[in-house]
Image (cartoon, grey):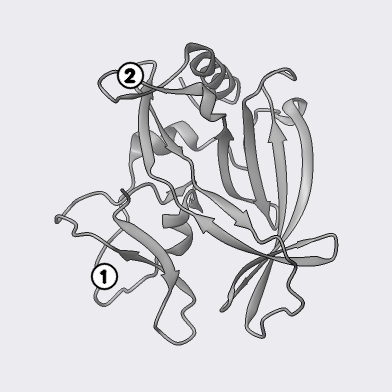
Amino acid sequence: MKKYITKQSGIKGAGKGLFTNAPFKKGEVIGLAHVNDQPASEIGRNHNHNEKNPTAYSKKNGNKTGKTDKIDKTSTVDISKYLVNESNKIIIYSSSGIFEMINNGLFQLYPVDKHIKEVTINNNLKLLLDGSYMKRHDTASYQIPYNHNIKYKTIRTYKNDIKSNIKFIIEMENESIYDFYMLITSADITNSESKKTELNNFVKDEVLSFLLRLNLYR
Protein backbone atom coordinates (compact mmCIF):
# COMPACT_ATOMS: atom_id res chain seq x y z
CA MET A 1 0.00 0.00 0.00
CA LYS A 2 1.21 3.49 -0.85
CA LYS A 3 1.95 5.70 2.14
CA TYR A 4 0.78 8.86 0.41
CA ILE A 5 -2.26 10.20 -1.43
CA THR A 6 -3.00 13.11 -3.76
CA LYS A 7 -5.86 15.39 -2.77
CA GLN A 8 -7.02 18.99 -2.72
CA SER A 9 -5.03 21.17 -0.34
CA GLY A 10 -6.83 22.99 2.44
CA ILE A 11 -4.72 26.09 1.77
CA LYS A 12 -6.63 28.68 -0.24
CA GLY A 13 -5.46 28.79 -3.85
CA ALA A 14 -2.90 26.00 -3.34
CA GLY A 15 -4.52 23.39 -5.61
CA LYS A 16 -3.70 19.72 -5.15
CA GLY A 17 -0.90 18.37 -3.02
CA LEU A 18 0.74 15.19 -1.75
CA PHE A 19 -0.28 14.01 1.73
CA THR A 20 0.90 11.10 3.86
CA ASN A 21 -1.61 8.51 5.03
CA ALA A 22 0.90 6.44 7.03
CA PRO A 23 3.96 7.24 9.17
CA PHE A 24 7.37 7.72 7.55
CA LYS A 25 10.71 7.14 9.23
CA LYS A 26 13.24 9.96 9.13
CA GLY A 27 15.24 9.62 5.91
CA GLU A 28 12.80 7.15 4.34
CA VAL A 29 12.38 7.51 0.57
CA ILE A 30 8.87 8.44 -0.57
CA GLY A 31 9.47 7.60 -4.24
CA LEU A 32 10.69 8.85 -7.62
CA ALA A 33 9.71 12.48 -8.23
CA HIS A 34 11.64 13.92 -11.19
CA VAL A 35 13.76 12.84 -14.14
CA ASN A 36 15.71 15.48 -16.07
CA ASP A 37 14.06 18.13 -13.86
CA GLN A 38 10.68 17.00 -15.23
CA PRO A 39 7.93 15.37 -13.09
CA ALA A 40 8.14 11.60 -13.50
CA SER A 41 5.26 10.56 -11.24
CA GLU A 42 2.36 11.90 -9.19
CA ILE A 43 4.94 12.71 -6.49
CA GLY A 44 6.77 15.10 -8.78
CA ARG A 45 3.54 16.60 -10.11
CA ASN A 46 1.84 17.20 -6.78
CA HIS A 47 4.33 17.74 -3.99
CA ASN A 48 4.26 21.28 -2.61
CA HIS A 49 7.22 23.34 -1.47
CA ASN A 50 7.71 24.85 1.97
CA GLU A 51 11.14 26.45 2.11
CA LYS A 52 10.79 27.64 5.72
CA ASN A 53 9.62 24.40 7.31
CA PRO A 54 9.95 21.49 4.85
CA THR A 55 8.63 18.08 5.88
CA ALA A 56 10.40 16.39 2.97
CA TYR A 57 13.16 17.24 0.51
CA SER A 58 14.37 16.10 -2.89
CA LYS A 59 17.53 14.05 -3.19
CA LYS A 60 19.25 13.51 -6.53
CA ASN A 61 20.37 9.99 -7.40
CA GLY A 62 23.39 10.41 -9.67
CA ASN A 63 23.26 6.91 -11.16
CA LYS A 64 19.61 7.11 -12.13
CA THR A 65 19.99 10.59 -13.54
CA GLY A 66 22.95 9.47 -15.60
CA LYS A 67 20.87 6.75 -17.23
CA THR A 68 18.05 9.08 -18.20
CA ASP A 69 19.68 12.37 -19.04
CA LYS A 70 19.70 11.74 -22.79
CA ILE A 71 15.99 11.79 -23.35
CA ASP A 72 15.73 15.58 -23.57
CA LYS A 73 15.71 17.85 -26.62
CA THR A 74 19.53 17.84 -26.85
CA SER A 75 19.65 14.08 -27.42
CA THR A 76 21.70 12.98 -30.42
CA VAL A 77 19.59 9.83 -30.75
CA ASP A 78 17.00 9.99 -33.52
CA ILE A 79 13.90 8.33 -32.07
CA SER A 80 11.51 9.58 -34.77
CA LYS A 81 11.93 6.34 -36.72
CA TYR A 82 10.32 4.47 -33.80
CA LEU A 83 7.28 6.78 -33.72
CA VAL A 84 4.02 4.91 -34.46
CA ASN A 85 1.41 7.39 -33.28
CA GLU A 86 1.00 10.99 -32.15
CA SER A 87 -2.13 12.47 -30.59
CA ASN A 88 -3.18 15.59 -28.72
CA LYS A 89 -5.02 15.96 -25.44
CA ILE A 90 -6.65 18.88 -23.68
CA ILE A 91 -6.66 18.40 -19.90
CA ILE A 92 -8.34 20.84 -17.53
CA TYR A 93 -7.26 20.97 -13.89
CA SER A 94 -9.75 22.70 -11.61
CA SER A 95 -10.96 23.04 -8.05
CA SER A 96 -13.76 20.60 -8.97
CA GLY A 97 -11.46 17.90 -10.37
CA ILE A 98 -9.68 16.92 -13.57
CA PHE A 99 -11.42 17.02 -16.96
CA GLU A 100 -10.55 16.01 -20.52
CA MET A 101 -11.94 17.51 -23.73
CA ILE A 102 -12.98 14.76 -26.19
CA ASN A 103 -14.77 15.66 -29.44
CA ASN A 104 -15.98 18.94 -27.91
CA GLY A 105 -17.30 17.06 -24.87
CA LEU A 106 -16.01 17.64 -21.34
CA PHE A 107 -15.50 14.46 -19.30
CA GLN A 108 -14.33 14.27 -15.71
CA LEU A 109 -11.39 12.03 -14.87
CA TYR A 110 -10.90 10.11 -11.64
CA PRO A 111 -7.44 8.85 -10.65
CA VAL A 112 -7.41 5.18 -9.65
CA ASP A 113 -4.23 4.57 -7.65
CA LYS A 114 -2.65 1.12 -7.50
CA HIS A 115 0.21 -0.23 -5.45
CA ILE A 116 3.59 0.45 -7.10
CA LYS A 117 5.87 -2.58 -7.40
CA GLU A 118 9.59 -2.67 -8.09
CA VAL A 119 11.33 -5.21 -10.32
CA THR A 120 14.98 -5.60 -11.26
CA ILE A 121 16.11 -6.82 -14.67
CA ASN A 122 19.59 -7.56 -15.97
CA ASN A 123 20.77 -7.58 -12.33
CA ASN A 124 21.07 -3.78 -12.01
CA LEU A 125 18.19 -2.06 -13.81
CA LYS A 126 15.34 -1.24 -11.43
CA LEU A 127 11.88 -0.55 -12.86
CA LEU A 128 8.72 0.68 -11.15
CA LEU A 129 5.47 -1.04 -12.15
CA ASP A 130 2.51 1.27 -11.63
CA GLY A 131 -0.95 0.03 -12.50
CA SER A 132 -2.60 3.37 -11.66
CA TYR A 133 -4.82 4.91 -14.31
CA MET A 134 -7.35 7.67 -14.99
CA LYS A 135 -10.98 6.55 -15.18
CA ARG A 136 -13.27 8.67 -17.36
CA HIS A 137 -16.87 9.45 -16.43
CA ASP A 138 -19.37 8.12 -18.97
CA THR A 139 -21.52 11.25 -18.96
CA ALA A 140 -20.22 14.56 -20.27
CA SER A 141 -20.12 17.67 -18.10
CA TYR A 142 -21.57 20.90 -19.44
CA GLN A 143 -19.68 23.55 -17.54
CA ILE A 144 -16.00 24.30 -17.06
CA PRO A 145 -15.30 25.20 -13.41
CA TYR A 146 -14.55 28.89 -12.93
CA ASN A 147 -11.12 28.27 -11.40
CA HIS A 148 -9.23 26.10 -13.86
CA ASN A 149 -5.95 25.61 -15.69
CA ILE A 150 -5.83 24.20 -19.23
CA LYS A 151 -2.95 21.96 -20.35
CA TYR A 152 -2.34 21.05 -23.99
CA LYS A 153 -0.50 17.75 -24.27
CA THR A 154 1.04 15.86 -27.16
CA ILE A 155 1.23 12.10 -26.64
CA ARG A 156 3.88 10.34 -28.72
CA THR A 157 3.93 6.55 -28.90
CA TYR A 158 7.07 4.66 -29.91
CA LYS A 159 7.75 0.98 -30.52
CA ASN A 160 10.98 -0.95 -30.81
CA ASP A 161 9.27 -2.97 -33.53
CA ILE A 162 5.92 -2.37 -35.21
CA LYS A 163 4.70 -5.80 -34.05
CA SER A 164 5.74 -5.23 -30.45
CA ASN A 165 3.08 -5.02 -27.74
CA ILE A 166 5.30 -2.77 -25.61
CA LYS A 167 4.84 0.96 -26.08
CA PHE A 168 7.20 3.74 -25.04
CA ILE A 169 5.17 6.89 -24.31
CA ILE A 170 6.43 10.48 -24.15
CA GLU A 171 4.03 13.20 -23.00
CA MET A 172 4.93 16.71 -24.12
CA GLU A 173 3.80 20.10 -22.86
CA ASN A 174 5.00 23.30 -24.57
CA GLU A 175 7.61 21.29 -26.50
CA SER A 176 9.10 20.01 -23.24
CA ILE A 177 8.93 16.50 -21.80
CA TYR A 178 6.28 16.28 -19.09
CA ASP A 179 6.37 12.53 -18.51
CA PHE A 180 7.63 9.31 -20.09
CA TYR A 181 6.97 5.66 -19.38
CA MET A 182 6.45 2.25 -20.96
CA LEU A 183 3.12 0.48 -21.33
CA ILE A 184 2.93 -3.28 -20.93
CA THR A 185 -0.02 -5.61 -20.33
CA SER A 186 -0.84 -7.35 -17.07
CA ALA A 187 -0.29 -10.66 -18.89
CA ASP A 188 3.42 -9.80 -19.06
CA ILE A 189 3.67 -9.66 -15.26
CA THR A 190 3.87 -12.77 -13.10
CA ASN A 191 4.23 -13.51 -9.41
CA SER A 192 6.54 -16.29 -8.27
CA GLU A 193 5.85 -18.70 -5.43
CA SER A 194 7.72 -16.32 -3.12
CA LYS A 195 5.27 -13.57 -4.23
CA LYS A 196 8.05 -11.77 -6.07
CA THR A 197 6.88 -9.77 -9.09
CA GLU A 198 8.60 -10.67 -12.36
CA LEU A 199 8.45 -9.70 -16.02
CA ASN A 200 8.56 -12.42 -18.63
CA ASN A 201 11.80 -12.79 -20.58
CA PHE A 202 10.33 -11.41 -23.81
CA VAL A 203 9.36 -8.15 -22.08
CA LYS A 204 12.75 -7.90 -20.39
CA ASP A 205 14.54 -8.24 -23.73
CA GLU A 206 12.23 -5.69 -25.38
CA VAL A 207 12.73 -3.13 -22.60
CA LEU A 208 16.51 -3.51 -22.61
CA SER A 209 16.68 -3.37 -26.41
CA PHE A 210 14.69 -0.15 -26.58
CA LEU A 211 16.60 1.55 -23.77
CA LEU A 212 19.90 0.60 -25.39
CA ARG A 213 18.81 2.05 -28.70
CA LEU A 214 17.95 5.32 -26.97
CA ASN A 215 21.20 5.40 -25.02
CA LEU A 216 19.19 5.32 -21.79
CA TYR A 217 20.95 2.26 -20.45
CA ARG A 218 24.46 0.88 -20.68
Q: In the orientation shown, which residue stands out farthest toward the front?
A: 138
The disc at residue 192 is 2
Q: Residue at x 49, y 76 (%)?
A: 15
19 displayed left or right of 94? left
Q: Residue at x 39, y 69 (%)?
A: 48
Q: Nearer the viewer, residue 104 or 181?
A: 104
Q: In the orientation shown, which residue stands out farthest toward the right?
A: 103
Image x and y of residue 51, in percent? 31, 73
Question: Quadrant of residue 3 in the image?
Answer: bottom left
Image x and y of residue 157, in percent? 70, 36
215 displayed left or right of 5? right
Q: Say above or below: 217 vs 9.
A: above
The disc at residue 26 is none
| Mark with earlier residue (1, 2) | 1
The amino acid on which the numbered mark 2 sits, given as a three-letter code, is Ser
Image x and y of residue 28, in percent? 20, 50
Mark 1 lies on residue: 54
Q: Residue at x 37, y 70 (%)?
A: 49
Helix, strand or loop under label 2: loop
Q: Quadrant of the C terminus?
A: top left
Helix, strand or loop under label 1: loop
The amino acid on which the numbered mark 1 sits, given as a three-letter code, is Pro
Q: Say above or below: 98 vs 80.
A: below
